[in-house]
């Protein structure tokens, strides 16, 4: 009725997957979730960000530390507003303080002033 199965002791099971995925920590300081990343994927200007935070980048402005490149916050933007990255010189994750995170550097462009 049942077929006996031979179990090999001290054997190794080879991985047949050709892509070795790895884990990454979200670069958003308020999220810090761990998620799988394809090794062919390289971190962009915002670093590795999880899928949840990645969707926020399309609807919000981003506040990022210039020193360590950590994402500190998302600021909601109007639907027709161009999404920009605000930089702070330092944050509490590198050499600054929490108060430094509130000193946002304005963005100067020829067609906009923020």
Image (spheres, rainbow, N blue to C red):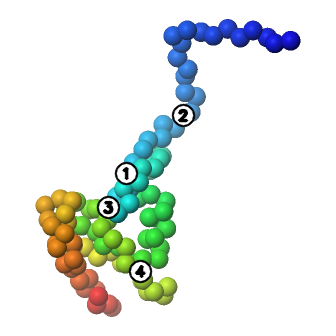
SS at circle 4:
strand
Q: Which residue is mark 2?
A: 18
Separation of marks 4 and 3 at Cα, in angstroms: 17 Å
Q: Are marks 1 and 2 in contact (CB under 8 Å)?
A: no
- Name the residue carrying label 3: 29
Q: Quadrant of residue 87?
A: bottom left
Single out the mark in the foreground, 1 or 2.
1
Which residue corresponds to mark 1? 25
Q: Nearer the viewer, residue 102 or 83?
A: 102
Q: Could you say which is closer to the camera, residue 5 or residue 11?
A: 5
* 10 Å crowding of disc 3: few (<14), some (14-19), many (20+): some
Sequence-wise first label, 3 or 2: 2
- The numbered mark at residue 76 is 4
Q: How many marks?
A: 4
Q: Assess whether mark 4 and mark 2 are in contact (beta carbons under 8 angstroms).
A: no
Q: CA distance from mark 2 to mark 4?
A: 40 Å
């Amino acid at each position: 009725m049942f077929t006996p199965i031979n179990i090999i002791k001290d054997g190794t099971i080879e991985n047949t997957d050709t892509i070795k995925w790895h884990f990454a920590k979200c670069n958003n300081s308020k999220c810090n979730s761990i998620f799988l990343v394809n090794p062919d994927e390289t971190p962009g200007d915002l670093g590795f960000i999880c899928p949840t935070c990645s969707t926020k980048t399309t609807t919000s402005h981003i506040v990022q530390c210039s020193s360590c490149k950590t994402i500190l916050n998302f600021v909601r933007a109007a639907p027709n507003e161009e999404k920009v990255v605000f930089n702070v010189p330092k944050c509490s994750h590198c050499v600054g303080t929490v108060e430094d995170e509130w000193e946002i550097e304005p963005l100067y462009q020829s067609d906009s002033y923020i």
